[in-house]
Image: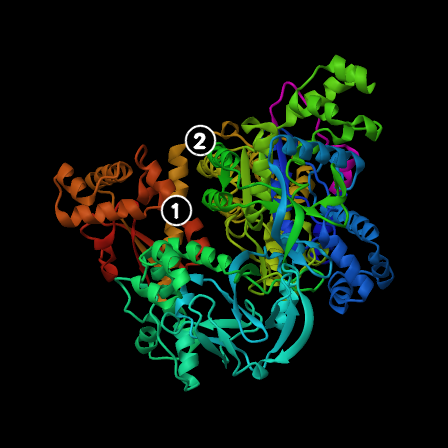
């Protein structure tokens, strides 16, 4: 039988037992403190992959740990049906999208007859909901499944609609005409979770300036309208297609085809015809501000997909414009517009000379520097007044000339508006970004779009201040959260179609998937009790249950729900809320988690904010983040089938720190599975050995070292330092038990080994609960997952016994390290121990000095010791193993005696044929390889022969 099948048989066996015994159903208990753990629920548009697994298993490990610490733990699960991810997949299947269908068939191994039904988004969502639930159960997630729901359930809709009426009352909802990222195919606004690769479209604005010619107006896009005074030409791409269109003022305008296809969603255009870029070359236009005639010229530097595909050339301040015009060998003016102390009069020209290149990529840093310095430190030149016609002179003199660039920019826009020569256009600055349907995202100015006003200064400031009351794991995620919250702007939150909750005051609109999943964790606490007609779940019901408004008598009388039931529902919410630990991938710091905090603060105030937010890194496959484009999507079900549940639980959570990405590959997984099997076999064998009743140093050492393990693992679980748990529980303890067996010549103390195994299994139960349960039942009929987490009070602690064995283990480590450095296997070892009591006392003082953060110099002065000795002892105190360092301050051993008494153990562990022990203070002892002189207390001199 494969290891995967071996562990899966164990897992599925105990999962059935836990379910039959309702182990994870959580109800309020007045005599036990609670912990409410939640994880961001998944979109039901495809099966779970191992990236999902990391977040869900991490939360499950934490929930299991807290149960064993005595808490009443609720860990629920639900499913996101809302939004475009599901709709886009359904429509892709309907269109016969080969990539989507191939992914389902080849990666997720879904039968083709099922995929054909996915054109119905409801069927698709329900199919993947059931598939996800099955996978979550196979993972052994300790979920209370009574509380599951979907975001299209009628009761959930009532709950979300109540929330949005509250936000409207509070003034956090507004409606206005505004640019939004938009899918031209699906015809609705989009956000991060609607796009391929989960990219959040970022919108920036540009100024479109009208340059009139005889028959047309060229619209040139620029981020720096104040430089128009120095515009001496228009540049077009000769190979691109350009559209002639009529705008709302009946002006015939010229822009590139790509620009037209995007800007038609922002500006009222009507297409009239088309011209090739090369057919525009040579036309004469006019600078609307200076009224000077300028030529339309060809340039390979013009990207027709950016802006309008028409560029106003300002060679005095833009290196690429200068290069483009000089390559054409055209005569042109250089008109300086901005002056700074840092740059010369013509920075565009000077940058080309300094860079000694005409490569745009190599000039980028120079261009960025010019833009930055001119905007922040630049002043518009006084002689700009001489460039404009008389009727503009007074405005330019008073408002623009001599003014800071940052102020003059707005006044230049004002001037262009007065000339009816400017429009604002919007671009996706991090584009191209693609919708899940495959269409490129554009910017659309939507009339009457509903927004959540995350820019509200009072709301935003309150949320920022509240972050101090939340524990963030990892700690540095708080800074990232602060930055995101500070920069949040109003967000379009409705869609014109799709699955989801209808906007309560406009049922044609659907609340999007990031906006209905904000305070939904409150819904978990009571969803299993909502067995009433939907009509009864009105605002008064939610006000009473969630905000404690009104009385049970009043609400009962109006709704016909028994008073006692209302009180029970409210008390359950108040018992469980707030969330004690909210878990998600770190990508959700960009949107979901800030929205989660904003909405909690608005609806519930500060007291119901989550007490902890945990964000984990990603899973990488083949050194890359999982992506369909890389072909490295790894379904969770496949991982479970190939490697086993327990292997997957460790491999996805515990081989790196929580903030780092984890590499998942077959070598790592197989290594974990093999180690788990070794642990299984070792514990099974130990439980069958009769053993002895005698208590010896190794027995007391084993109990004492387990006190350390309990402390370390408990702290690591609490901080979600799962790598430390993994290394300690599955490797360090395993090696410790093996050392114990060798130290006792396999004559184990049965009572002690049972006690230690009991502790070991309870330490591993949160991460590998199925393996722990299987082995636990070789000793007990109770469920290990319901047992108490080990306490240091369960074991006795003896410093001397602990020091003896840890000293032996440090010798083994030193011999192995030295052997590796020398590149040869040790056959004979000579050990020199230093039993100088004066040096031992000095070492204790050095350890205390280091703990007190005293320098080497301070240590030397305080102890009046020579430089060489002080330095050696001080350095030794720094490098000794922490356990030994802590122990020798309060206890002492005879090093030579300990080695001699355990020489067989040392020789077996090191595979030696001979070991000799000398005292370094014995004048008659030979000084082999000079190692006698190197010996210090608790750091023997070691010669390998």
State the residue in front, 801 or 285. 285
Which residue position holds label 1?
808
In the picture, the quarter occupied by the N terminus is: bottom right
Q: Which residue is mark 2?
A: 797
Q: Secondary structure at mark 1?
A: helix
- Asked whether 281 falls inside the magenta stretch, the response is no
Q: Nearer the viewer, mark 1 or mark 2?
A: 2
Q: Quadrant of the C terminus?
A: bottom left
Q: Quadrant of residue 98?
A: bottom right
Q: Is residue 148 above or below residue 390?
A: above
**Residue 25 falls within the magenta-colored stretch:** yes
**Residue under the point 17% across and 40% down:** 858
Report the span colored magenta. 14-34
Residue ID at (15%, 37%): 862
Left or right for 190, reference 423: right
Q: Is residue 827 visible?
A: no
Number of residues whose C-alpha sits closer than 10 Å to that of mark 1, classed few (under 14), some (14–19) or many (20 or more): some
Q: Could you say where residue 169 lies in the image, as x and y percent from the top left?
A: 64, 30
Residue 257 occupies quadrant: bottom right
Q: Position of residue 248 (x, y in %)?
A: 64, 61
Q: Nearer the viewer, residue 695 or 276?
A: 276
Cα–Cα gap, marks 1 and 2? 18 Å
Along the viewing direction, whichever of 441 and 788 lies nearer the viewer = 441
Question: Is residue 941 visible from the viewing direction of this image?
Answer: yes
Q: Residues within 10 Å of mark 2 (few under 14, many from 20)?
A: some
Q: Nearer the viewer, residue 775 or 197?
A: 197
User: Is 636 rendered above or below residue 245?
Assistant: above
Asked if 665 appears above or below 680 in the picture, the reply is below
At mark 2, the secondary structure is: loop
- For this orientation, the residue located farthest to the top is 553
Q: Position of residue 753 (x, y in %)?
A: 56, 37
């Amino acid at each position: 039988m494969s290891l995967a099948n071996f562990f899966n048989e164990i897992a599925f066996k105990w999962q059935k037992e836990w379910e039959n015994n309702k182990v994870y159903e959580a109800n309020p208990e007045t005599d036990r403190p609670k912990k409410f753990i939640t994880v961001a629920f998944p979109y039901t548009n495809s099966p779970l992959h191992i990236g999902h697994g990391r977040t869900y298993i991490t939360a499950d490990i934490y929930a299991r740990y807290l149960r064993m610490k005595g808490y009443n733990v609720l860990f629920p699960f639900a499913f996101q049906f809302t939004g475009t991810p599901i709709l886009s997949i359904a429509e892709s299947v309907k269109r016969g999208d080969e990539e989507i269908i191939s992914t389902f068939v080849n990666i997720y191994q879904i039968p083709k007859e099922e995929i054909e039904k996915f054109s119905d988004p409801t069927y698709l969502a329900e199919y993947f909901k059931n598939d996800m639930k099955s996978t979550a159960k196979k993972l052994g997630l300790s979920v209370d499944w009574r509380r599951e729901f979907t975001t299209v359930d009628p009761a959930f809709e009532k709950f979300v609609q109540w929330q949005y009426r509250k936000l409207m009352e509070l003034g956090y909802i507004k409606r206005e005409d505004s640019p939004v990222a938009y899918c031209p195919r699906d015809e609705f606004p989009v956000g991060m979770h609607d796009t391929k690769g989960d990219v959040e479209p970022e919108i920036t604005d540009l100024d479109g300036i009208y340059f009139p010619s005889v028959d047309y107006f060229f619209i040139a896009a620029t981020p720096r309208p104040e430089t128009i005074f120095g515009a001496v030409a228009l540049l077009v791409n000769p190979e691109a297609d350009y559209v002639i269109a009529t705008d709302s003022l009946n002006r015939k305008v010229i822009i590139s085809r790509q620009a037209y296809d995007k800007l038609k969603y922002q500006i009222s255009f009507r297409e009239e015809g088309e011209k090739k870029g090369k057919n525009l070359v040579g036309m004469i236009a006019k600078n609307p501000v200076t009224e000077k005639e300028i030529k339309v010229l060809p340039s390979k530097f013009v990207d027709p997909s950016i802006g309008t595909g028409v560029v106003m050339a300002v060679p005095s301040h833009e290196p690429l414009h200068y290069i483009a015009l000089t390559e054409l060998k055209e005569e042109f003016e250089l008109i300086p517009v901005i002056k700074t102390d840092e740059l010369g009069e013509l920075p565009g020209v000077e940058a080309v000379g300094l860079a000694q290149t005409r490569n745009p990529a190599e000039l980028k840093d120079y261009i960025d520097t010019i833009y930055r310095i001119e905007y922040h430190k630049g002043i518009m030149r006084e002689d700009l007044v001489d460039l404009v016609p008389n009727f503009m002179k007074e405005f330019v003199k008073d408002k623009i000339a001599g003014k800071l660039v940052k102020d003059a920019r707005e006044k230049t826009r004002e001037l262009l508006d007065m000339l009816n020569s400017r429009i604002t256009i919007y671009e996706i600055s991090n584009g191209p970004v693609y919708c899940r349907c495959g269409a490129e995202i554009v910017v659309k100015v939507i009339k009457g779009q509903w927004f959540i006003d995350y820019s509200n200064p009072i709301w935003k400031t309150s949320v920022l201040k509240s972050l101090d009351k939340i524990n963030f794991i990892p700690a540095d995620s708080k800074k990232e959260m602060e930055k995101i919250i500070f920069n949040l702007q109003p967000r379009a939150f409705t869609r014109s179609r799709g699955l989801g909750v209808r906007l309560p005051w406009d049922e044609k609109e659907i609340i999007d998937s990031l906006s209905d999943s904000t305070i939904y964790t409150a819904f978990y606490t009571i969803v299993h009790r909502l067995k009433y007609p939907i009509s009864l779940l009105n605002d008064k019901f939610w006000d009473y249950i969630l905000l404690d408004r009104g009385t049970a008598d009043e609400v009962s009388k109006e709704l016909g729900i028994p008073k006692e039931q209302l009180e029970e529902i409210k008390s359950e919410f108040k018992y469980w809320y707030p969330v004690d630990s909210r878990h998600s991938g770190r990508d959700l710091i960009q949107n979901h988690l800030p929205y989660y905090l904003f909405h909690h603060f608005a609806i519930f105030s500060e007291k119901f904010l989550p007490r902890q937010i945990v964000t984990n890194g990603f899973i990488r496959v083949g050194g890359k983040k999982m992506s369909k484009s890389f072909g490295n999507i790894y379904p969770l079900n496949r991982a479970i089938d190939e490697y086993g549940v327990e292997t997957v639980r460790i491999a996805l959570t515990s081989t790196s720190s929580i903030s780092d990405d984890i590499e998942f590959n077959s070598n790592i997984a197989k290594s974990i599975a093999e180690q788990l099997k070794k642990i299984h076999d070792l514990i099974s064998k130990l439980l069958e050995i009769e053993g002895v009743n005698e208590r010896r140093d190794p027995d007391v050492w084993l109990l004492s070292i387990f006190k350390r393990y309990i402390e370390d693992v408990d702290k690591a679980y609490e901080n979600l330092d799962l790598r430390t748990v993994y290394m300690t529980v599955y490797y360090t303890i395993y090696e410790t038990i093996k050392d114990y067996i060798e130290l006792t010549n396999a004559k184990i103390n049965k009572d002690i080994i049972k006690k230690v195994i009991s502790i070991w299994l309870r330490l591993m139960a949160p991460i590998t609960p199925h393996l722990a349960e299987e082995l636990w039942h070789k000793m007990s009929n109770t469920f290990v997952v319901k047992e108490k987490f080990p306490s240091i009070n369960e074991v006795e602690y003896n410093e001397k016994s602990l020091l003896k064995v840890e000293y032996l283990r440090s010798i083994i480590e030193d011999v192995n390290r030295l052997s590796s450095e020398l590149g040869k296997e040790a056959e004979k070892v000579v050990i020199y121990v230093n039993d100088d009591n004066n040096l031992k006392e000095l070492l204790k003082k050095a350890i205390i000095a280091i703990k007190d953060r005293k320098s080497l110099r301070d240590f030397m002065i305080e102890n009046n010791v020579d430089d060489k000795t002080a330095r050696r002892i001080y350095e030794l105190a720094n490098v000794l193993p922490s356990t030994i360092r802590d122990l020798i301050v309060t206890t002492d051993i005879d090093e030579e005696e300990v080695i001699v008494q355990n020489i067989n153990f040392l020789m077996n562990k090191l595979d030696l044929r001979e070991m000799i022990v000398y005292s370094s203070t014995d004048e008659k002892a030979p000084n082999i390889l000079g190692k006698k002189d190197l010996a210090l207390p608790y750091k023997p001199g070691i010669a390998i022969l």
